Image (spheres, grey):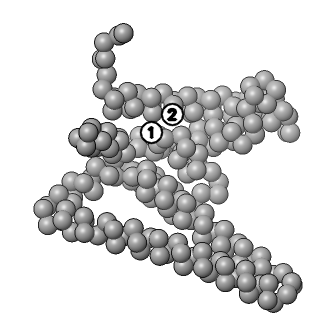
Amino acid sequence: MNAISLSLPEIADRIRHALHNNVIEIGDLLLQAKAQLDHGQFQTWAERELGIRPRSAQNYMNAAAFVKDKNETVALLPPAILYKIAAPSAPKEIVERVVNAEAIDVSAIETELADYRDRKRIAKATTRMKSRKPSRQNNDRQLAKLRREEAQAKAAEAARQAEIRPLIEKLTASGLAEELFRVLHDWRLYETFKDMLREARR
């Protein structure tokens, strides 16, 4: 067995860089290929030659186009988050916050994007039901269901805040809140922090 030369955080960091670099390189190459093909031919070519489905190809190309002229923090986002932020449908306020941030809390961004999708889905469903002409009773039931879901989402967030608040108060009192905030907003530090905390609990 080979001697261990890299720590787990170092290995994770290198893998993240490799994944990111591959995503951007593939996206750039796909953009070049698309420019050489006639309209409507690209998807067929990508599936036939590479086995890449249209949605995956679009994710790669969006990511490659998005990171151009962006800072290193954005450029090193994990691919799954990068695809979501680079998508044309991504909420502008979240994208701007990510682009302008010195450090990014990946978990917080994932939560914000999920909340945005839920709000958009509820708003779309509500609008759709209001434009339909089925029975008023059925509409009322559907609206009530959507309102329950929205209330449940708010209650879940309130419960999470209530669970975390005592810890925040302790950290603030001890003077460690600012340090922890810095760690949580730099995803590279955050990953290392999680690994070290997991080891400390063993």
Q: Let me know if residue 29 appears in the view.
A: yes
First reached walking from the N terminus: tag 2 or tag 1: 2
Q: Residue at 38% across / 27% down in the picture?
A: 11
Label ID, residue 157: none
In front: 167, or 69? 167
- Horizontal side of 199 relative to 69 (left or right) equals left
Q: Which residue is mark 2?
A: 20
Under mark 2, the amino acid is His
Horizontal arrangement in the rendering, residue 164 relative to residue 30 (left or right) = left
Front in this rendered view, residue 36 or 46: 46
> x, y (%) of residue 137?
79, 89
Distance in Å between CA atoms under marks 2 and 1: 6 Å
What residue is at 39 percent from the left and 31 percent from the top? 12
Kindly identify which numbered label has been placed on residue 76: 1
For label 1, the SS is loop
Q: Is residue 129 above or below residue 24?
A: below
